[in-house]
Amino acid sequence: MKKRGSVLLAIGAFLLANLKWIASILKFSKFGSTLLSMIISLGAYAMFYGWKFAVALVYLIFVHEMGHLVAAKRKGIATSPAIFIPFAGALISMKDHPRDAGTEAYLAYGGPLAGLISFLPALPLYWYTQDPFWALVIYLGALLNLFNLMPISPLDGGRIVSVLSTKIWLVGLIGLGAMLFFSPGPLMVFIFVIGLITWWSRLREGYQHQVLHYEKEKLRDFLQEIVQWPSLESSWDKRMHLQEEAARYAELPPNKGFLIPFLQDDKRFARDRERLDKVYVNRLVDLFRQWEREPVHFIDSDPNRPAPSSVLLEGEQVARQRLEEVEEQMHRLTTYYVAPASTKWKVLIAYLALAGVLSVFFVYSQQMLHR
């Protein structure tokens, strides 16, 4: 005991003496955040379940997340390093959006597939040693990855089946709701809430597209309006017209009251049109005031060659940037979940095959643990 205590004290003294250097390595290392969060999770799991269980669980989660990272790298999508969250697993964030649901499904599939591979070495180890610990590793690996294959966004399964139909998300939500009824837990409640929000957002994409289309028309009108200002003989009439429009919208009563989605979308769309009209007329008024106050500059000091207005150029640039964003969002809403039939069949077969294999190992590991 004294020898072990001396060794621990020596290790502790070394870590304290070199803490600054260790922290610097973790801070500037590409995987420093992954390593640090992994150590924290390992300690948290060990406090409640012991070191062997903690190491097995962190290892399984780590390999699962590496599967996502490898898949993302193969598709050329930049991601953040994996971050471990005690008692909630781990996550990575994508720095770039996948171009379509098929690409997202590929990224999502990489995690459970790597998760399956992660616990396969435990099979011969169990057969050779008959140690229940290896059966537990297989059980945990199968359970974690089967849970991740539930067809609920943001779980991997939800992102995979989105290629087939996002309507499947509702089936997954009903299944998870039943699980919550019999065995509630904070993590499952969180996943259920996020899944419900994602499903509802997908359900309302048609209405969102309608609003974006109207904003696109407002932006085009905005650009056509400001391009005419330099040729105005007098700015008085235009200023009065814009101010009257802004005053008319300012006098409108505020929209209050809840509108039922789908049933009252016409009234909701009227509100959104009024909101966008008000926003863009106020932008025109502000831009016009700035343009009027802007000093006139001339090219080569020639009074017949006025230089382009920097105020209008900046206003045009901002409007065109927003127009590109709106068009990109509209394109994404209409094409993101579109996939050829061949892709859908491949995804369906791959999804069912992986779920089937994991289910077999899940049942088999239960039998090994009950021997």
Image (tube, rainbow, N blue to C red):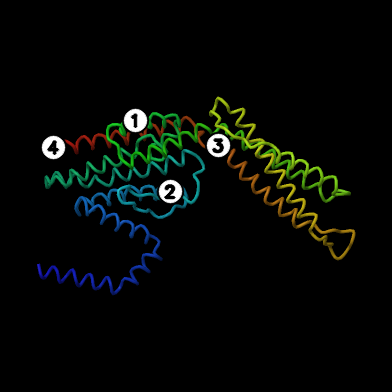
Image coords of residue 301 (percent x, y): 87, 65
- Most distant residue in the top direction: 263
Q: Pointer 1: what residue?
A: 175
Q: Of marks 3 and 4, which one's residue comes earlier in the chain?
A: 3
* Real-space Cα separation, disc 2 to disc 1, in angstroms: 29 Å
Q: Pointer 3: what residue?
A: 333
Labelled pair 2, 1 in contact (Cβ < 8 Å): no
Labelled pair 3, 2 in contact (Cβ < 8 Å): no
Q: Of marks 3 and 2, which one's residue comes earlier in the chain?
A: 2
Q: Of marks 1 and 3, which one's residue comes earlier in the chain?
A: 1
* Real-space Cα separation, disc 3 to disc 2, in angstroms: 22 Å
Q: Nearer the viewer, residue 21 or 272?
A: 272
* Real-space Cα separation, disc 4 to disc 2, in angstroms: 39 Å
Element on which disc 2 rests? helix
Q: Which residue is depicted at the point 87% across and 59% down?
A: 305
Q: Please name the amino acid that badge 1 sits on.
A: Gly
Q: Nearer the viewer, residue 323 or 40?
A: 40
Q: Quadrant of the N terminus?
A: bottom left
Q: Pointer 4: what residue?
A: 370
Q: Of marks 4 and 2, which one's residue comes earlier in the chain?
A: 2
